[in-house]
Image: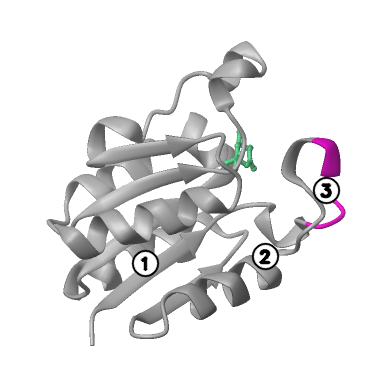
Amino acid sequence: MARVFVLNGVNLGALGTRRPEVYGTRTLGDIEGELREHFPGVDLNFRQTDYEGEFVGWIRESAGADGLVVNPGAWSHYSYAIHDALEAIAVPKVEVHLSNIHAREDWRRTSVISPAVDAVVAGMGSYGYRVAIQYVLEH
Ligand code: DQA
């Protein structure tokens, strides 16, 4: 069975109540449930943390998996530590953002982690996770 890590970073645990006009009303648990239903044959390692060091540790742990999907939240815009952790592992990896970061504030338009991943999905809501998981499974 393919093993895919789906790692969610800072503030993503607040989905559901956090800016619903931007992120929708579904919780991270709802999204996880939807993904488990959609990919019954995949061993999804779905996690969230507000601690950057823990997130970096999980990225390292995913080196032994078949794929990695990350939504680091606001860390995407400034964390070179997450960039370097991603750069160091060879698994297929995709960056996901629920919202279209290019249509929001200027500071969100840059993701410093994008050069370290294979692909980026933004603005598709939870469907973006599905696309990203499908991609890593096929690579
Ligand atoms: C986000 C976009 C980031 O700019 C923001 O800080 C988040 C969520 C997204 O999924 O759209 O926390 O990564």
Q: In this view, does 53 lie above or below 81?
A: below
Residue 35: image location, x then y, percent: 51, 71
Assess disc 1: are there few (<14), some (14-19) or many (≥20) residues with their C-alpha within 10 Å of its C-alpha.
few
**Image quarter for ligand 1:** top right
Quarter containing the N terminus: bottom left
Q: Is mark 3 on a helix, strand or loop?
A: loop
Task: Say which label, 1 or 2, has the lower sequence index.
Answer: 2
Instruction: Give how far apart the Cα atoms at labels 1 and 3 are.
Output: 26 Å
The kind of residue on which mark 2 rests is: Leu
Residue 94: image location, x then y, percent: 32, 48
In terms of depth relative to the viewer, which is nearer, 27 or 36?
36
Q: Name the residue under label 2.
A: 28
The magenta segment: 16-21
Q: Is residue 20 magenta?
A: yes
Q: Where is residue 49 in the image (x, y as percent from the top left)?
A: 58, 64
Mark 3, other Cα within 10 Å: few <14 / some 14–19 / many ≥20: some
